[in-house]
Image (tube, helix red, strand yellow):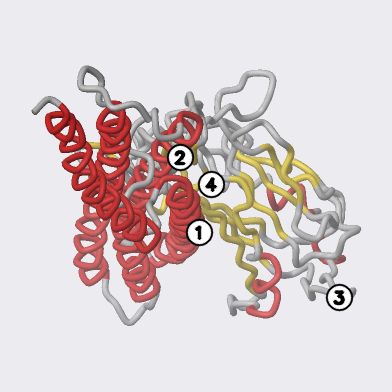
Amino acid sequence: MAMVVKNNMSAVNTLNTLNKNQSALSQSLQKVSSGMKINSAGDDASGMAISERMRVQVRSLDQDDKNTKNGAALLRTAEGAVQSTIEVLKTLKEKAINAANDTNTDGDRRLIQIEVDKMIDQIDENALTTYNGKYLIDGTRNGLVVGDAPDHKGTYTSFTNMSLATDTSGLTRLVNLKRRDGNDVGIHSSDTITASWTRNGVTYTGSLTPIGTRNLVAAISIITSTDASIYSENELVGVDAYGRDVFTPDNKPAITIRASNPGIDGQIAGVTFAVTDSEGRMRNEVNAVLDAFKETVRAQNPSPDNALVLQTGTRANQEIKVGFTDMRSVALGLQSQDGAGWDHNTALLSAGVGVVGDGPKIQVTTREAANAAINVFENALIKATDEAVNIGAVQNRLKYTSNNLVVASENVQASESTIRDADMAKEMTAYTKNNVLTQASQAMLAQANQNSSTVLSLLK
């Protein structure tokens, strides 16, 4: 190689090598200090884009998990209010059973009624429970309620008796009624049948005596046509809130009584049938069958869909809807909607029908009213426990959703780590190598810069 002084190519080459080593050392130092092998788009453009999308997904999944936990907290609040209502209803049924016992005087029953009134007020207090300022179970957060066509004015109360034989019809004589197992119910023509029912907090009662040759339609007609009548003799028991047909659980025919009017205003809170013999003794074995009319469709007013929406997915409209039914005492059939009670208009009462509880809250001030109230509170308990089941089912769903979100977030985080996180052992090896090469380059540059000085010996 020629000896020159103007261009020291050895030094130039060594300097270029030194710059490359310093650049590599700087990158290694950045990866080791940050713990990531991709710190900018220049490191790996496609890898950085993929990892950023994964980071967005991880943060979204974590927020979804927070949403589910907040939703679970809301549901626990609603559940607590419903459970409190269930406890109140248990006590109310206990009070009604107590009031139905003739060891109590009318004065005792008036005292029991005071307790009943206060506990019904407590049910309304429970219905005003809020979460973050939102009322939950007062009927403002219910789902869609359409009801029966063509008027769509809400749902009708339905009571179904699945203890009678499947071939029972409204024209079947009471003395010929058979049980589900085919045996005779055991009603005698000399017996008396009494029906009690509650509507808008007022309890009515009426009797057929003696039964004679009367049929089931006659017995149910005690409940005046303005309040309820036979709806079906087959497996159809009514129409739900969404306008869909509701059938018996076993899809076998049964006798269904339905309220004459839809919504809470037309709601029948309870129906009670009792048969006594000619000497006034209760026919308990008969009543076990006739008094088995259970509520199969709940009365609800028409309403738009006001259900709460819990966002539980990373994309739009990935959500869980939670609707709470109305848990106020009016919706449970425990008092009148207008708070008025019976207006003492006897012209509305048919022959043989009287009022034994004048409202506006459900009454236990007479033995007859207390007996009717037992079934009213039982039906209210069914409504409340149904709502508790609904809330519990959504809570379970949220629990599984949360578990799924946590696992998904963990797996996406692991994938993002594979793309972006640095292998520290590998990067430390590279850092050590680049550090040594940089120091060697610096030393050789010093040597290369000394090479030009040897030309001076020729100039002496």
Q: Secondary structure at mark 4?
A: strand
- What residue is rendered at 37% in x and 37% in y? 139
Q: Can you identify the residue that label 1 sits on?
A: 400
* Amino acid type, callout 4: Val
Give the alpha-carbon distance from disc 3 to disc 2, as whole Å: 64 Å
Judging depth in this view, the residue of 232 and 421 nearest the camera is 421
Q: Secondary structure at mark 1?
A: helix
Please name the residue that numbered disc 3 is placed on.
181
Q: Nearer the viewer, mark 4 or mark 2?
A: 2
N-terminal-most mark, 3 or 2: 2
In this view, the mark in front (3 or 4): 3
User: What is the spatial separation of the Cα atoms under label 2 and label 1, in whole angstroms?
Assistant: 23 Å
Q: Residue 52, percent across and down?
A: 41, 34
Q: Which mark is nearer the camera, 3 or 2?
A: 2
Precedes in sequence: disc 2 or disc 1: 2
The local secondary structure at tag 3 comes to loop
